[in-house]
Image: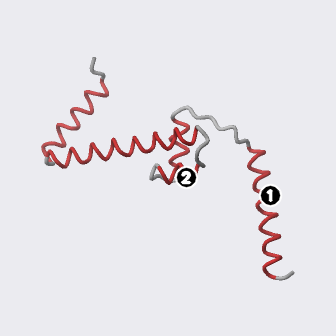
Amino acid sequence: MQTFKDTMVLIHLAKITLLETRSTIIRKLLSIGYKGFIKKKAAEDYRAGKITISETSKNAETSVWEMETYLISQGYKSEYSIEDLETETLQQLIYNSVKNRKHTGN
């Protein structure tokens, strides 16, 4: 059964066909399908713990923010808490401070 959304997509495609060639429409549809596929694959790899969020966004050809938004829209819930972020940030600040002292000789 065809949904309202499907009907709207078909109407939109019909309007586009008046303005664009068939090959242009096919290229656009393939591009949309490809982008959706790589985003879904990257999300699956991230959920499985195979890659980091940065790698996920790179593989999906999106920004980290866009990838996080996509993951949330797909029902992903992170176990990374505010406390984890604060701890990691503090550790990074201490590391950078020590590194800078060694580099400057102080």
Task: Name the residue at the bottom extreme.
Answer: 105
In which image quadrant can residue 82 be found? Answer: top right
Which residue is located at x 56 percent, y 37 percent?
72
* Residue on which the image places disc 1: 91
In which image quadrant can residue 16 be found? Answer: top left
Residue 70: percent from the left, percent from the top? Answer: 50, 41
Task: Name the residue at the right extreme.
Answer: 106
Query: Which residue is nearer to you in this view: 94 or 2?
Result: 94
Disc marking residue 52: none
Name which residue type carries label 2: Glu
Mark 2 crowdedness (10 Å alpha carbons): few <14, some 14-19, many ≥20: some
Query: Which residue is nearer to you in this view: 37 or 13?
Result: 37
Q: What element carries label 2?
A: helix
Mark 1 crowdedness (10 Å alpha carbons): few <14, some 14-19, many ≥20: few
Say whether residue 14 is left or right of residue 89. Answer: left
Separation (CA) of disc 1 from disc 2: 22 Å
Which residue is located at x 13 percent, y 48 percent?
21
Say whether residue 73 is left or right of residue 52. Answer: left
Residue 88: percent from the left, percent from the top? Answer: 76, 53
Which residue is located at x 84 percent, y 82 percent?
105
Q: In which quarter of the image is the N terminus?
A: top left
Name which residue type carries label 1: Gln
* Residue on which the image places disc 2: 55
Say whether residue 44 is left or right of residue 3. Answer: right
Task: Name the residue at the front extreme.
Answer: 50
Q: Earlier in the sequence, mark 1 or mark 2?
A: 2
Q: What element carries label 1?
A: helix
Residue 69: percent from the left, percent from the top? Answer: 53, 43
Foreground label between 1 and 2: 2
